[in-house]
Structure formats: structure tokens, C-alpha cells
Image: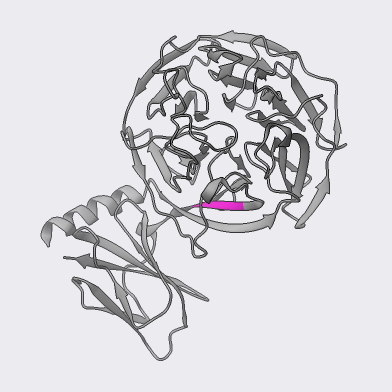
Amino acid sequence: MLKYLVAACAVIGLLSSTRAQQFELEYLATLPEPVANNAMAVAELNGNTYLYSFSGIDTSKLFSGIHLNSYCYDVTNGQWLTVPPVPQSMGLVAAGATYHQGIVYFVGGYSVFANGSETSSEKVQRLDVATNTWLSDAADIPVPIDDHVQALWRDSLLFIVTGWSNTGNVPDVQIYDPANDQWLTGTSVPANNAFRSFGPSGTIIGDTIYYLGGASMGAAFPAQNQLRKGYIDPASPSSITWSFEIPNPNATCYRCGTFAAYTGGGTPTAVWVGGSDVTYNYNGIAYNGSGGVSPRDSLWIYDPATGKITASTFNNPNNITLPMDLRHMTSAGQSNGENEFYIMGGMVANQTVSDSVLRLTARPVRVAEVPFTLHAFKVYPNPATDEFRIVRKRSASSLLSIRLINLKGQVVRTFKAQENYSSAGLPEGLYFIEIETATDRFYQKLLHQ
């Protein structure tokens, strides 16, 4: 037992300065129509949060079902608003969208013709959020692109990294300067299959680009598990130093959602959500001939401080499936150290195109900041082997939720109020029981043997 108590002391000391993250998934709204492979963006204006979906494919999953429809959900007031369609002549999938200083920039994507041929787009459309109108097009992308990584650096420059351009994956790093409506050329990723990719997902943390997975060139476009890093020189942002590694060989990620989670203190983490571990065409059918692809329903966290990617659990009381066929994720501002991230549509089981709007909330787990004594509850047996019980004192408030948290701050079990709680199957070690009532939140150490 002593080794676990020593470990707990070390973790408690760490958590006083850095905070682990706890993720909760919930259903938020229903899209006007199901859509997948759509571009998503979030805008915050006059105290309201707006979620945008642009283009994508409908339930037919045919080339003719690829469209230009736009939707906006007002999260603050819980209502859908009318948005003009993307002003192009052909429908698009695999585009990107980013909000910056009142404007949503809709970038790239590809169209599919009746004969099966495809063409990548060089267009950048600009939606004025305040007036709900499309402005004149921004400067064309030098290299037409789709299924790319798209991320904003220091709220000033938009980085477009690798992706597919008409005939194959390209190494280009294209940097858009919104203030001057011009494109800069960044240091390309190395021109090999370790870096070039379509369908990867990435974000920027500080001055480093992180992008994971995607599809490589080659027979059946193999899925990738590489994490690539690009350090942006702040004095010369077009100068980027590239490297790659495989921190977790199981973290294969194709068309995942991604975001950077800032939950206060320590180093922000990069998070990849949903997606699949098999690559597929716009219709959800695998390139390798195995048929329809299923979503992986996973959540991967990369911690720059440790250099590791780990799979994480999340609170999901309604058993919602994390979809695949995503184009990044939309994130809202922070509140009390919490981040809110949104998924609009995507594909779920049997390549079903979804009409769900989901919210994933990242919260700090402040285990070290609360007393470890349950003033109103008793937990026994402790140490536990397969199960434990929680006895409530007569004066204590009723239980709302019970969670079991490991030393990494990850929620490993979620329970409803009941007689016995199972810890069977968990690795031996020290955990924290979190008990939430209507008025308080208590924590108690539990040693599982």
C-alpha cells in the first residue's frame, strides 16, 4: 500500500499546479438535415455563441448529394438561423472553416462529378457573421486543396497544411494573411508518406502545429498513426521546423475532430475525437475493399509535457457514439477553466449520416484542491477488490452522480446512485471517488487491490 500512497502524494503535488481534464459528452440539438464531411466553425459575437456548418454530403451518400447548404445554430438562444449557401457552382466536401475577427473563412474542399472524377477547390469564401452575408472571395489558394489541416496561429495567420490536391497528397504549407488578403509560402512538410496526408486532423498549441493520422499514398491509401510537429518561428512565421514520431501506434486517426484543450494551469493538450481507423471514400466505403467503415468512437489526448498519446474515457450517460467523417471541431470560449467543443453531423454506425449536434465539455479536475474526507458519506471496504459501498449520513444531501477517477485525472467509471459500485477489472492502484450532490462535491481516496 505504501507505494500507492507515495504516488498519490506526488500526483497531489502535481495537480496543485497543473490540472487534468475531464470530458463530458452531451446531445445539444438536431441539424435541419443530416450532413457529413461538412466544414464547421464557431463564432462569438455580442455575447452569443454561433455554430456553423457549411457544405457536406447528405443521406444519399452519392456524388449528387454533395451540397453547399449552410446552417447556423445560436447556442445562446437555442435556435437555428438561416444562412445563405456557400456561393459556388458545385457542392463540396472536405473543406475547412475558421472564424477570425467577425469573418468565417471557408477554404478549399473537393467536388465530385457524375463520372467519378474529382476536383480540388482553390476558393476561399468569406462570411460576414454580423450581416449574415457572403463577401467577395478572398485571394485564391495557390495550390487547390482538400482534406487538409487548417488552424489559426496567434489569432492572425491561417495555416493550411498538406492535404490532397487533385491527383495526390502534397507537402505544401500555405499561410493566409487575412489582414492583407494574401498567401505566404511556409516551409513544406517533408515530401514523403510520413508527412504528406489527406484526412489528418490538427491544431496549433502555442507556436507548434500538431497533426495526427490521415491517409497515405499507396495501395488502398493506408491509414496513418504518425504525429507530426511543426515549430513556427515567431519572428518569421513562414519558417517551420518539422519532425514526426509515433507516440502511440494504436492512435490511427482518419477524419477525426481535433482541438486544443485549455483547462487552466500547465500545458494545454491536443485532443482527437471520433474518426475511424480505416480510410474510406466520401460515401463511407473503405478504399481497401472491406466494405462500409465504422466509427472508432475514441478520444485520444496528446500531452506535450510528456510526449505521450493516451486513450481517454469520457462521461457519456446517453451512450452517444462519437462520429467519423469530421472536419475538425468548433470550440467556444473558456468559462471557469472549462472549454466547450462541438460536433455537427458526421457518420455513425453503418455509415449513417447524422443530424446530431454534440457538445464535448473539457473541465479541469481539481482533485488536490478539495478535502479528501467525506464529511457526509462513508466508503467501505477500502481497500476494495471488486466492489465498494457508499453509506450516506442521515443529514447528507442525496447523491446525483458518482465517478471513479484515476491518478491521471481520467474518469474510469461513472455510476448512478445505487447500493453497490463495481471496481472489478480496474488495474490495481489508487483512485479517487467523486461524489456530487445538489450542493457539494466530495472526494475520497480508494485503494483498489
Q: Residue furthest bottom?
A: 394
Quadrant into which the N terminus falls: bottom left
Rendering colour mode: one colour
Give residue 55's position: percent from left, percent from top. Answer: 72, 35
Q: In this view, does 189 lie to the left or right of 343?
A: left
Name the spot of residue 56 as percent of width and height, x first.
Answer: 68, 36
Q: Is residue 251 above or below residue 196?
A: below
Count of labels in the image: 0
Work out whether residue 202 can be spotted.
yes
Q: Is residue 357 left or right of residue 272?
A: right
The C terminus: image quadrant: bottom left
Left or right of 50 in this view: 24: left
Q: Which residue is drawn at 31% across and 33% down?
A: 249
Decide which of 210, 155 is in the foreground and name it.
210
Front-most of residues 268 and 135: 135
Q: Give the range drawn in magenta.
A: 358-362
Which percent across, then down, holds residue 394?
Answer: 40, 91
Name the residue: 68% across, 13% down.
141
Of residue 299 and residue 129, the one placed in the foreground of this image is 299
Residue 62 in magenta? no
Closer-to-camera residue (411/318):
318
Relative vertical location of residue 108 with respect to residue 298 in this rendering, above or below: above
Magenta stretch: helix, strand or loop mostly: strand
Could you say which quadrant of the image residue 51 lies in? top right
